[in-house]
Image (cartoon, rainbow, N blue to C red):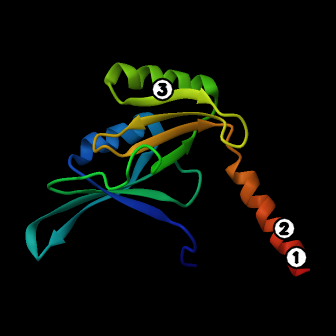
Amino acid sequence: MPDLGFTHIALPVADLERSIAFYQTYAQMQVVHQRRDPIDEQPTGRQVAWLSDGRRPFVLVLIQTAEANAMLPPPFAHLGVSCESRAAIDTLCKQAQQTGVLLQGPQDSGPPIGYWAYLRDPDGYTLELSYGQIVEFTVEAAAQASQSILE
């Protein structure tokens, strides 16, 4: 059966290995696929990696390019990752501050936003770490509401 729905987001990156390391550290993602694409039938190709947290059928596709310009205007255009606890966010934020990638936070905005922080990835994209966002429950409630309207 083919994949249905939202499956990935692709971002150009300047240094694939550096970006992989960032998302492994701060988003607990692992490489699930890696390849070199042919470009205009030349032997050198663009390196591509798919990363996943293994929790849902969704991947972050990183594509190495000669130059990566973060086209998602920070900080509000961002990638969001849910963490297991506030303490996990605090630990990652301390590490992010030491490595110079902490943009904002952590802070508590209450429901439905929760406890969150912003980090800057190697190419300038924003990664939000959060705990207590109720995305899953909001989606389930909307699906249940739609189903009861149909019945």
Q: What is the CA distance from the residue labelled 1 to the residue labelled 3?
A: 43 Å
Q: Is residue 98 left or right of residue 108?
A: left
Upstream in the sequence, badge 3 or badge 2? 3
Mark 3–mark 2 CB contact (< 8 Å): no
Which structural element holds mark 3?
helix
Mark number displayed over residue 145:
2
Upstream in the sequence, badge 1 or badge 3? 3
Q: What is the CA distance from the residue labelled 3 to the residue labelled 2?
A: 37 Å
Q: Is residue 102 left or right of residue 47?
A: right
Image location (x, y in percent) of residue 21: 33, 38
* Residue at numbered disc 1: 149
Residue at (11%, 76%) from the top-left corner?
Answer: 40
The answer to which of 50 and 129 lies nearer the viewer is: 129
Which structural element holds mark 2?
helix
In the figure, 129 relative to 62: above or below? above
Image location (x, y in percent) of residue 60: 42, 55
Q: Is residue 66 left or right of residue 56?
A: left
* Residue count near mark 1 (Cα–Cα under 10 Å), binned few <14, some 14–19, many ≥20: few
Quadrant of the image containing the C terminus: bottom right
* Residue at numbered disc 3: 92
Q: What residue type is labelled 3?
A: Leu
Q: Quadrant of residue 86?
A: top right
In the figure, 7 relative to 116: above or below? below
Mark 3 or mark 2, whichever is nearer to me = 2
Residue 28 shows in the view? no
Which structural element holds mark 1?
helix
Q: Which amino acid does label 2 sit on?
A: Ala
Q: In which quarter of the image is residue 131?
A: top right
